[in-house]
Amino acid sequence: MKVLGIDDNPDINMLLGTVLTASGHEFTSVTDGREGIKLLQKNPYDIVLLDLAMPEFSGFDVLDSLKKDGLIEKQKIILLTASSITDEEISELLKTGVRSYLRKPLDIDIFVEKVEQVHRGR
Amino acid sequence: MNGKTLAKSTKKNVGKLQRSSKSPKKVDNPKKTLESSPLEKTIEISSLKKRYRIFYDELPGLLRTIDTEGIILDCNKEYAETFGYSKNELIGKSVFDFLAKEGTRAFKDSFETWVKTGKVKNKPVWFQKRDGSKFLGLVSANNLYDEDGKMIGSNTVIKDITEIHVAKMKIEDHQNEVKEQLMQLQKSNELLRTTEGKYRNLYEKTPALLRTITAEGILTDCNEAYAKALGYTREEAIGMSIYDHAAERSAKGMRDNFEIWLKTHETPSSEIWLKRKDGSIFPTLLGGTSLYDEHGNLTGRTLALTDMTEIYEARRKVEEGQKQLQNQVKQLQKTNDLLTITEKRYRTLYEKTPVLLRTITVEGVLTDCNEAYAKTLGYTKEEAIGVSFYEHTAQRSVEDLKSNLEQWKQTQQVSHMDIWMKRKDGSIFPALLTGTSLHDEQGNLIGRTVAITDMTEIYETKKKLEDDEARIRDQYVELKQAHGLLAVTEQRYRILYEKTPVLLRTITVEGVLTDCNEAYAKALGYTKEEAIGMSFYEHTAQRSVEDLKSNLEQWKQTHEVSLKEIWMKRKDGSIFPSLLSGASIFDEQGNVIGRTVAITDMTEIYEARKLLEAKEARIREQYEELKKIDVSKEEFTSMISHELKTPLTPIMGWCQALKNPNIMGHLNPKQLQALDAILTNAVKLKDLVGDMLDAQKLDMKKMKFDHNDVDVTEMMTFMEKNLQSAMEPKHIGFVNSTKENLTLKGDRSRLEQILNNIILNAVDFVPNEKGRIEMRAESKDSKILFTVKDNGIGIPKKKQDRLFTQFYQLDTSATRKHGGSGLGLSICKGIVAAMGGEIWLDSDEGKGATFYFTIPRVIETTSKIQEQNQFPTF
């Protein structure tokens, strides 16, 4: 499957890429939300990993933009969040079309499992 | 009675009253106003005096106070009324001006004796009233002495005894009259007796006039006495008819007598008036003997005629005397009747007078007494009479009475004396004795009548008077003290008024200053002299005039001075803010006459207020800044959360990736060991950052909680399984003993966090061998009680309180050994509290510890704050 990672931290993108590639998946990453949107507008991905806390153009902005384009329903988005966000807030986000979420720091094994689980739930 | 003090206090009070009446109240001089307080006291004393005066005035009887010159110093109402003057007319006059002419000498004697000896003679004196009428007064006196014991006057009681006197006089007059009449009567009787004797003599001794007449009444013979008596010669007389010798008035009598004689030959003795030759007549007593001839034929009779003139004369005289006597007897009777009436009146007076009267013999035995006397002493009259007067005398007065009796016997004068009488029941009462001696016809003293006045009331009055005096004296002393105190207080008040830094002014109801203190004058730039007398509007800034006006009006109506901010104006026109507060001043009648106003210069306060306002503004600014800082702090927190955790993700992730041979290939054991060390420390760092963020959120009450259905029983099972790995290193026996099916609505992850904290804490403290931890959830009322029990080292009691505070750890070595942020339990406490539960522990050192916390089945979190929602809804 094709996975798009949107995170401003390239180290994390590299980690996620390494882990997913090791599991046989194709991984593309961008460090800017706007770039991610551009990619999504061109080609659909199986899974989008979206970091919420990004400077300038945050994960929320990305979600906003995708909602405008009507892409949010078509994409399987997994949020990567900080612990300051409560479950309740996340469940609000889940209602809007986001498929799942993962709290940072990530447990690599759980991460892969989760991604594959969401992909299967198509 | 204490005459000294009466005189003294009376004088003083009079002086005081005059002084006080001369000091009218002036508002414009505060010093005088202040001095009016003793005036009030004086008025108080004057009211006392008034009471005393009323008492004095209302005393029954005529009461006057005189000095030794006989000048009247005072008198009561009855005295003045009786004499017909006003009191003012009487006071200052000499007592001699009110005597009747006939009383002057007696009174003068009595007065002089009194001045010399202090004793008042018990002698009634005639007084003269304004209308010229007189009355007889019995004078008794209580002397007044000065402090040295010198007599300076007396309180004199005058008792009007005119009526008794008049009655007595009348009786005496009548007695004299009767005596005189009796003497006359005796004289008359003697005369009568003499006359009668003479008559008898005459009757016997007078030679009878004899005539012999025929049956026809012709004189055939007469004796010389007859002829002479009738003024005839015998020769002339013989041959005349008897009728020629009969007076006209006796002609019929003679004829009747003649007829009777002719028929019966008897000559009844009868009185016949004979007529002399000269025609004058005289009475005779006719007696006759019949004359008969030898044949027994009546031939005539011889009549004996007795000249009755003298007898008649005597008889007339006797008759006259008798008539006179009769008249005199009648008169006497009349007099006696009168006397009886008078006596009766006298007796009535004696009986009915409220004065106790008794009559005694020279031995002191009662021969009479009136009802009042008997009644007062509790006897019947019959019981009282015949008894020695000593039995009616109290023991204390027996000696006095004895000497009085002796004195009376010798001088026959009954002196006025105070005596204590004794009643039948043994009770006693004070009395005043006055008396009159009784004499027999020979002038021997046979007794006396004593008038006794019950002095009980007077004594009580006197006592009351004394009490009053004492009270007045006491009050005077108190007043003096109060006055002294007042002076001190006044001084203090004045100093206070002057020296207080507060501006003080005293104003009239019109707002004119009557006083102010130095501070006031100085603050307004005036001298005190300039300031006083000015209207307070002149001291008021234009902007405050209206306020002050309404304030003044309000004060006039309510007498209340409300606190008010007023701008004052200085002499130089500059103004300053001030706060007014005041107290009303009242006169004695309770009328408001002014107020004293305290003015606080508010300039400083105004400036202070300005400063305060500036400071407040600054504080507000700072507050806003702080608020901003708060916001940025939160932003900082959020930043930390992200920034601190963000590097942890690649660290921990790469560690995991490296450990996974499928991803990065196989590592040698040493490399794996190093990787584990990095990972363990990364996890620790992650936990520390998490704790720090939680503690900060709790501090700021910004922690947010979920409200989801939580299956507590399932959660406990999950926890038990999840934590097993933590128990392995020490082989701790970890048990979940939850038995109930429990659910609640809340935040599961936070509940797990609490349990984790407590259990992992216990893990650190249980022994390395046979460590045991038991956890349990059970329902407790509307809450769920969680228990975590261990068999660790326990916590000393005195450290338990601090256990839940931030960064508290049992000891530093433990910190090193057990690690942790030192925030764990404080975070637990914060979360439990935020959820509406409680947390506590039960532990003894060395005996393990049991932690408890309760969570409501429905969590109403206080720290769920919606502001700054970073997540707008899509």
Image (cartoon, coloured by chain):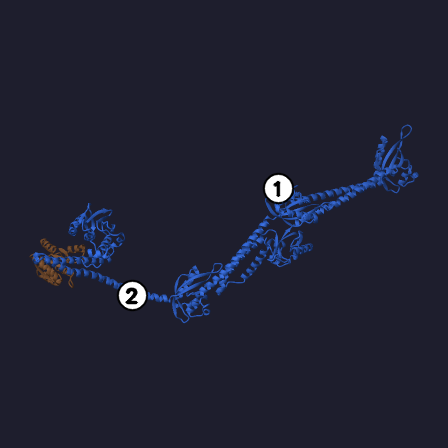
Chain colours: A brown, B blue
The reply to whether residue B852 is visible in this rendering is no
Q: Position of residue B336 (x, y in %)?
A: 71, 43
Q: Position of residue B520 (x, y in %)?
A: 43, 67
Q: Residues within 10 Å of mark 1 (few under 14, many from 20)?
A: some
Screen quadrant of the N terminus of chain A:
bottom left
Chain of the residue under label 2: B
The residue sitting at the front extreme is B769
Q: Is residue B548 left or right of residue B158?
A: left
Chain of the residue under label 1: B
Give the amino acid type for the residue marked by disc 2 in the picture. Answer: Arg
Q: Residues within 10 Å of mark 2 (few under 14, many from 20)?
A: few
Instruction: Report, in whole angstroms, how far the alpha carbon at label 2 lies from the one at label 1.
Output: 106 Å
Tell which of B537 and A52 is nearer to you: A52
Residue B455 sits above or below residue B263 on the image: below
Which residue is tagged 1? B379
Labels 2 and 1: the sequence-earlier one: 1
Say which element carries label 2. helix
Tell which of B282 and B816 is nearer to you: B816
